Image: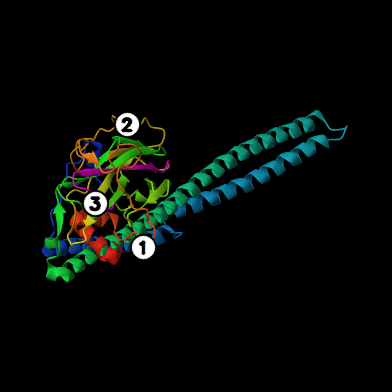
Amino acid sequence: MTTPALLLSVTPAFADGEPAEQTQHKPSVAELEKAAAAAKTAYDDAVAAEAATLASLKVVMSDTTPLALAAKAAETAATDAGTAKTEADRAAADAKAAVDGLPATATDAERTAAATTLAKAEAAAVAAGEAKTAADAKAVEADDARDDERVGAARDLSLARAVTKEALAAKTAADEALAEAKELHGGDYFDTCVSETELTAVIRGLPSTVVAGKRVDFTFRVTNGTDKAMDRLFPSVYIRATSRSGHKPLDHLVHLQRWSPAASKWKNVDVEHYMEKISPLKAGAHVDVKMRFTIDASAPAGNGVPLVSGSYWNVDGTCGTTANNQGPGFVIATAGSKPGHTKPGHTKPGTTGPDTSDLTPQSGSSAGPVNGSLAATGSSSATPQFALAGGAAVAIGAGAMFAVRRRKAGSRV
């Protein structure tokens, strides 16, 4: 089954180096139409692949496959071997009884004949037992092969259904972004909500190798490099992960959290929510968010990349988003592997923005996990909740990602 490339933006190339910085431009309606068409094609392909996988499962579950027939034959042979052993054991027992029942008047010839018959019967019983053991082992092996094939087919169907679900989410996000662009300002929506090149979002302290089952701590920094304050800014981070081949999504195995100074505790982060808003983010200031994540210890080797963004709205109606949306890629190592390391505060080549450590923290102090003013509302109902598929975030770009979320922000921002 071929997994739609639209959904799996993390590729095996990250195993060999860091991704290049990506600068997203304001997408036009035509570009969004193209992205929506691509998302539809990916969804149609996923639906077709799921149907084909279901058909394959039905075939594998039948009793006429080569492995099913082989298992049936092995079971029959084991049954026959068991019957043969039972008969041989009975014959040996009869021969033993005959020897034990010889009368005192039996001749030497009669005693010799009875002993010979017993020896042959006991040898035949031993051989029958060995044959039964071998037949039973072959039956178990054949049963396992048949069952493994069936379990594998069922697993393929489960994966195909997950891909279809993700493709539908990506298609929905692309369609919403396109509809938003056409609806607002006569299709000129992105002429008012700009891609702000001096508003940057970067990941700091992320190692090049992440070991499954081990916690990873890092910092997410949003910097307002402009000369104007941004009234409300919503930062976003999402960890995208796939298998080493790039064909199997692993996002469901990633557990991302950020530190909430308002609640004084760690909170889960998902693709559908911004984190606590920053109100405001002053000109030349930055805010650091303390974050961490783990990947389930059961995860296979793979690749990952953080998707980052920051979107702002001002009281005068201006709005925009970061021009970048991808952080440094990393390799996912299986549980028990030796972790990779980066120096504290070091931003790997390929992060999506400059090291802005020389800019002033908004609070005027670098103490604490967060430098800046994070809204006390946290991710409660007062925080905008936005539908966004992980695959669509990369395929469409930060501008469309921003558009989808802005529609659902409404007056709450």
In the rendered structure, the answer to whether residue 143 lies left or right of residue 193 reads right
Q: Nearer the viewer, mark 1 or mark 3?
A: 3
- The part of the chain drawn in magenta is 279-297
Q: Is residue 282 magenta?
A: yes
Q: Which residue is the extreme one toward the front?
A: 364
Where is mark 1, residue-wise?
Answer: 55
- Taking 115 as reference, is 79 above or below it? below
Q: Are marks 1 and 3 in contact (CB under 8 Å)?
A: no
Question: Observer-nearest residue: 394 or 363?
Answer: 363
Q: Within 10 Å of the Cα at label 1, are there few (<14), some (14-19), or many (20+) other Cα atoms?
A: few
Instruction: Indicate which disc residue 310 carries.
Output: 3
Q: Are marks 2 and 3 in contact (CB under 8 Å)?
A: no
The picture places residue 121, in percent across and down from the top left corner, at: 68, 37
Task: Find numbered disc 1 in the image and state the secondary structure of the residue it sits on.
Answer: helix
Residue 42 visible in the shown view = yes
Where is mark 2, residue-wise?
Answer: 340
Q: Are marks 2 and 1 in contact (CB under 8 Å)?
A: no
**Cα–Cα gap, marks 1 and 3:** 44 Å
**Where on the picture, by quarter, is residue 60?**
bottom left
**Cα–Cα gap, marks 2 and 1:** 43 Å
